Amino acid sequence: MRKKLLTNGNVFKRTDGRWGGVVWYMDEQGERKRKSFSGTTK
């Protein structure tokens, strides 16, 4: 079984000027997980 995306994700500008993103997905065991990341460019 593969990971399944639950949302298209969300990208936003953080207060420190960096960009952040969040994606919700379902893992191989069927558990709902969140992956977040950030960077200097969008």
Image (cartoon, helix red, strand yellow):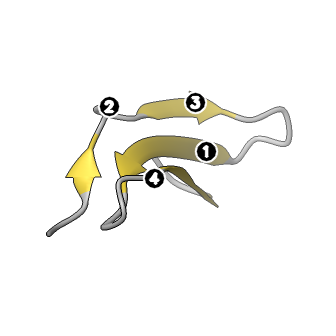
Q: Are marks 1 and 3 in contact (CB under 8 Å)?
A: yes
CA gap between label 1 and label 2 equals 15 Å
Give, as a three-letter code, the residue at label 2: Thr
Residue bearing the label numbered 2: 7
Specify which label sits upstream in the sequence, 1 or 2.
2
Instruction: From the viewer's perspective, tell me whether residue 37 is left or right of residue 15.
Output: left
Which residue is most to the right? 16
Specify which label sits upstream in the sequence, 3 or 2.
2
Residue 25 or 15: which is nearer the viewer?
Answer: 25
Element type where label 3 sits in the image: strand
In the rendered image, residue 35, in percent from the top left (x then y), is placed at 53, 56
Residue bearing the label numbered 4: 31
Residue 34 or 10: which is nearer the viewer?
Answer: 34
* Residue appearing at x 70%, y 48% in the figure: 18
Instruction: From the viewer's perspective, tell me whether residue 5 is left or right of residue 34.
Output: left
Specify which label sits upstream in the sequence, 1 or 3.
3
* Residue appearing at x 26%, y 45% in the figure: 5
Residue bearing the label numbered 3: 12
Element type where label 4 sits in the image: loop
Which residue is most to the front? 29
**Which quadrant of the figure has residue 20?**
top right
Question: Mark 1 or mark 4, which is nearer to you?
Answer: 4
Question: Mark 1 or mark 2, which is nearer to you?
Answer: 2
* Residue appearing at x 51%, y 51% in the figure: 33
**Residue 14, above or below 28:** above
Residue 33 or 19: which is nearer the viewer?
Answer: 33
CA gap between label 3 and label 2 equals 15 Å
**Which quadrant of the figure has residue 12?**
top right
Give, as a three-letter code, the residue at label 3: Phe
Dot 2 crowding, Cα within 10 Å, few <14, some 14–19, many 20+? few
Give, as a three-letter code, the residue at label 4: Glu
